[in-house]
């Protein structure tokens, strides 16, 4: 009887593990810094910052599930954010700026897809090149200068994407929750999600089964580009500014969120719930470390350790399963 229960729980082991880790971390931080973690203010702050990394991590989870990597999204954020800033200022229409940003993100994603799917460049190499290209393009186009967007505060788009519901709850947290639910249905209940899982598990078998692997992978990169653009617009509105280094700090956070959440680096398996919880863990670590009285220099060490341990655990689990 006990063995049967354990067998039924085994598929949910990554979700249970990452949830337990979150609970233990919160308990530890509450004990070490009760003045910070037993108040509501810190959690409202988390609701305004963590959703940006979470959305990027959700998109990257789709890529990793399909056996692909996208290292260009920080630079796509920069060039898409610049498109939003320039078009919004020139036309006095944030909605047109949003459309321009999404179009730029789609174009950047299409370039990645073309290089990977049509040319045959490995995704990790293609997106590293695209990372440098789009960052350089953004810096050259802006002449290395930031763009002030303070005049966009109070606009309808600002209120819709990053406004405060009831004066306190950040709108981006609701967007993140809604999109996370939508993405879960796409990955687990839609033919597109099934195709990604098959492609990541066995590319040749997926092709033999009639899955349109090239079109699916191309759309995957376009989807990631548009998601990066959307997040970039939200950040521009939240910070009332665009800067040439926009997006640079998200690479490590996003990858750590994906892998600590239980998505296999080998493809064919992923959990969006785990990614969301993983992003929350990553989001609270820095605040917890500083509130506990430790130097902020510990943060990157902890992030790197989390990635190494998570990837190693999945590799050992896969090795054990095969033997």
Image (tube, rainbow, N blue to C red):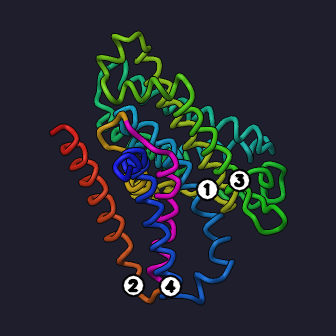
Residue receiving disc 2: 295
- Kindly give the residue lying farthest to the left in the view shown: 323
Other residues around mark 2 within 10 Å, as few (<14) / some (14–19) / many (≥20): few
Q: Position of residue 95 (x, y in %)?
A: 77, 40
Secondary element under disc 3, as helix, strand or loop, is helix
Secondary element under disc 4, as helix, strand or loop, is helix
Q: Residue at x 52, y 49 (%)?
A: 273
Query: Could you tell me how far apart the alpha carbons at marks 4 and 1 are, in whole angstroms?
Result: 29 Å
Viewer-side label of 1, 2: 2
Is 277 included in the stretch rendered in magenta? yes
Other residues around mark 1 within 10 Å, as few (<14) / some (14–19) / many (≥20): many
Q: Position of residue 177 (x, y in %)?
A: 65, 50
Residue receiving disc 3: 174
Query: Could you tell me how far apart the alpha carbons at marks 3 and 2 are, in whole angstroms?
Result: 32 Å
Asked if residue 212 is positioned above or below residue 129 in the image, the reply reads above
The magenta-colored residue range is 269-290
One can see residue 300 in this view? yes
Q: Position of residue 86 (x, y in %)?
A: 67, 45
Looking at the image, is mark 4 or mark 3 earlier in the sequence?
3
């Amino acid at each position: 009887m006990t063995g049967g229960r354990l067998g039924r729980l085994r598929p949910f082991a990554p979700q249970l593990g990452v949830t337990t880790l979150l609970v233990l971390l919160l308990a530890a931080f509450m004990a070490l810094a009760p003045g910070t973690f037993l108040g509501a203010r810190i959690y409202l702050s988390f609701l305004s910052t963590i959703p940006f990394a979470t959305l990027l991590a959700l998109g990257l989870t789709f890529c990793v599930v399909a056996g692909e990597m996208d290292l260009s999204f920080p630079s796509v954020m920069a060039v898409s954010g610049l498109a939003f800033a320039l078009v919004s200022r020139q036309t006095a229409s944030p909605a047109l700026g949003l459309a321009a940003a999404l179009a730029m993100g789609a174009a950047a994603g299409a370039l990645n897809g073309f290089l990977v799917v049509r040319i045959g460049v490995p995704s990790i190499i293609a997106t590293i090149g695209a990372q440098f290209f789009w960052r350089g393009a953004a810096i050259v186009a802006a002449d290395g200068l930031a763009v002030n967007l303070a005049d966009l505060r109070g606009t309808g788009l600002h209120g819709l994407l990053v406004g405060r519901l009831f004066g306190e709850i950040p709108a981006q947290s609701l967007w993140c929750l809604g999109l996370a639910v939508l993405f879960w249905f796409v990955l687990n209940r839609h033919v597109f999600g099934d195709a990604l899982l098959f492609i990541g598990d066995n590319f040749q078998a997926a092709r033999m089964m009639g899955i349109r692997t090239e079109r699916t992978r191309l759309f995957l990169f376009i989807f990631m580009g548009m998601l990066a653009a959307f997040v970039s617009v939200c950040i521009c509105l939240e910070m009332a500014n665009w800067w040439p280094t926009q997006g640079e700090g998200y690479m490590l956070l996003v990858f750590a969120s994906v892998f600590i959440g239980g998505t296999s680096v080998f493809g064919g398996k992923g959990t969006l719930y785990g990614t969301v919880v993983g992003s929350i863990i990553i989001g609270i670590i820095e605040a917890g470390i500083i509130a506990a009285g430790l130097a902020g220099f510990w943060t990157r060490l902890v992030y790197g350790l989390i990635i190494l341990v998570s990837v190693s655990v999945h590799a050992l689990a896969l090795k054990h399963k095969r033997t």
